[in-house]
């Protein structure tokens, strides 16, 4: 079965393409390369020993999407394509609403025209905002604290309403917690263009001496060591979650949302110590003021995904950090 993978050259999309191939699906990658490079395609072909289809295009280009879906006979879509920098979204909100929300509307129109009614959507734990309780389950109220987060809330609403209006549609929204890790080959991983916004790629760049030191944002949170706690999940576990969503929910119409997390939280200091241990490197850091908009603690209740998708995260923190280190030391400047 052919699956259109928007944003398939990006971090999570590229790893998911490998999981799709492993499970016998054929990904058709569609990406405008705003936050990725064609080097990713070469690595995907090298790891899988397959020739993959890649089309350079924007999800706001509905005509091109239609053409690609029809030409390849795609039967489902996994929709990763989005801008994802929280800070940038507060400075350029309309850029985010246009790319993420208008882009998703364009994608849904193209799907409708081509008779495709199945979509798996990259959502985020950001749709829970500053959580009322932890662990966070899917019934937690939905809200956002920044324009990026609102784009995820809005797209989920569009998907829900579409499924309510047209009963043949199925939409599965996967709410990721904090994706980290790299493919175990060491040939593919997170490849941020510019300064990383997220913790793990920053630590990895400090470990290879691309950066002097890490700033730990906040040492005075109400957590055991004073630093923020998150639910870090290995990107290959996340990738498999998408495959399970396609396999288990195919044919079930309606809107479904699932948390993809481990259910276990780690602090920033625990992440630093784990990385130092697995890499054998020192990670210089300085405790700085809290970052605007950060929450003290977030981790998932992953029970629903375990039940409905027959999926659970299998890789632990040492594997996450060891895999990032293998990737980062192979490609210190990315690909
Ligand atoms: P990424 O930036 O590595 O990948 C996104 C890809 O989409 C990039 O290759 C980019 O070039 C492409 N893209 C962006 N806008 C596009 C457009 N208009 N048309 C075509 N392609 C476009 O990001 P990622 O970390 O792989 O994230 C994938 C998805 O998961 C995103 O929707 C993101 O919001 C969501 N998500 C990510 C995280 C995270 O921490 N990485 C957490 C939760 C949710
Ligand atoms: C993790 C922890 C920071 C960087 C963001 C988005 C969220 C989602 C995932 C897409 C926090 C601390 C970080 C650094 C630090 N993205 N930190 N120094 O903030 O949980 O989530 O990415 O949907 O929407 O908000 O992830 O990796 O940025 O931060 O101390 O240089 O690391 O304060 O406690 P976050 P993160």
Image: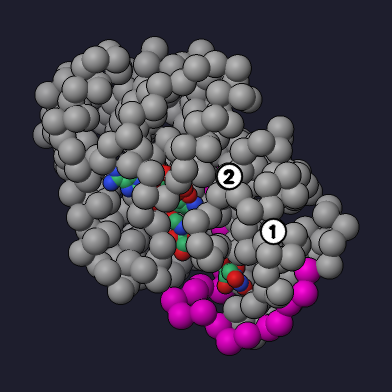
147 to the left or right of 113: right
State which quarter of the image contains the N terminus: top left
State which quarter of the image contains the C terminus: top right
Place of residue 171 in the rendered image (x, y in percent of width and height, measured from the top left): 30, 33
Place of residue 302 in the rendered image (x, y in percent of width and height, measured from the top left): 55, 44
Residue 133 in sight: yes
Instruction: Inspect the magenta stretch and tell me whether residue 284 lies in it.
Output: yes
**Measured Cα–Cα span from mark 2 to mark 1:** 15 Å
Which secondary structure, mark 2?
Answer: loop
Vertical position of residue 32 compared to residue 270: above or below = above
**Residue found 61% across the figure and 24% down from its top:** 46
Q: Which residue is mark 1?
A: 204
Segment colored magenta: 283-304
Which secondary structure, mark 1?
Answer: helix
**Residue found 69% across the figure and 58% down from its top:** 204
Query: Residue 22 lies in what quarter of the image?
Result: top right
Local packing at callout 1 (Cα closer than 10 Å; few below 14, some 14-19, many 20+) is many
Mark nearer the viewer, 2 or 1? 2
5 to the left or right of 260: left
**Residue found 54% across the figure and 16% down from its top:** 50
Place of residue 320 in the rendered image (x, y in percent of width and height, measured from the top left): 71, 47
Q: Which residue is mark 2?
A: 335
Closer-to-camera residue (311/190): 190
Residue 252 in sight: no
Instruction: Count how many numbered circles sit on residues in the image.
Output: 2
Which of the colour schemes (rainbow, by chain, secondary structure, one colour) is used? one colour
Instruction: Inspect the magenta stretch and tell me whether residue 201 lies in it.
Output: no
Local packing at callout 2 (Cα closer than 10 Å; few below 14, some 14-19, many 20+) is some
User: Mainly helix, strand or loop, the magenta region?
Assistant: loop
Vertical position of residue 163 compared to residue 145: above or below = above
* Comes first in the chain, label 2 or label 1: 1
């Amino acid at each position: 079965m052919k699956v259109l993978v928007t944003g398939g050259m990006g971090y999570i999309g590229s790893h998911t393409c490998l999981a799709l191939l492993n499970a016998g699906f054929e990904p058709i990658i569609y990406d405008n390369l705003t936050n990725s490079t064609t080097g990713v395609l070469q690595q995907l072909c090298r790891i899988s020993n397959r020739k993959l289809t890649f089309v350079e295009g924007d999800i706001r280009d509905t005509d091109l999407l239609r053409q690609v879906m029809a030409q390849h006979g795609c039967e489902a879509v996994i929709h990763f394509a989005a801008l994802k920098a929280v800070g940038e979204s507060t400075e350029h909100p309309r850029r985010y609403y246009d790319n993420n929300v208008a882009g998703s509307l364009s994608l849904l129109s193209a799907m409708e025209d081509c008779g495709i009614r199945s979509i798996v959507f990259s959502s985020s734990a950001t749709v829970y905002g500053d959580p009322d309780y932890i662990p966070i389950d899917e019934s937690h109220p939905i809200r956002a604290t920044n324009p990026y987060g609102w784009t995820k809330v809005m797209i989920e609403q569009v998907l829900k309403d579409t499924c309510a209006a047209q009963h043949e549609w199925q939409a599965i929204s996967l709410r990721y917690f904090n994706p980290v890790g790299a493919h175990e080959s060491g040939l593919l991983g997170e490849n941020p263009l510019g300064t990383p916004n997220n913790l793990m790629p920053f630590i990895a760049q400090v470990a290879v001496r691309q950066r002097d030191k890490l700033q730990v944002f906040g040492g005075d949170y109400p957590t055991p060591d004073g630093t923020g706690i998150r639910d870090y999940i290995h990107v290959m576990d996340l990738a498999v979650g998408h495959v399970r969503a396609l396999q288990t929910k195919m044919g079930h119409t309606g809107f479904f949302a699932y948390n993809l997390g481990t259910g276990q939280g780690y602090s920033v200091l625990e992440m630093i110590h784990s990385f130092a241990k697995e890499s054998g490197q020192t990670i210089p850091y300085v405790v700085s003021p809290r970052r605007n908009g950060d929450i003290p603690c977030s981790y998932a209740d992953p029970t629903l995904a375990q039940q409905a998708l027959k999926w659970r995260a299998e890789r632990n923190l040492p594997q996450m950090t060891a895999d990032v280190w293998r990737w980062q030391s192979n490609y210190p400047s990315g690909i």
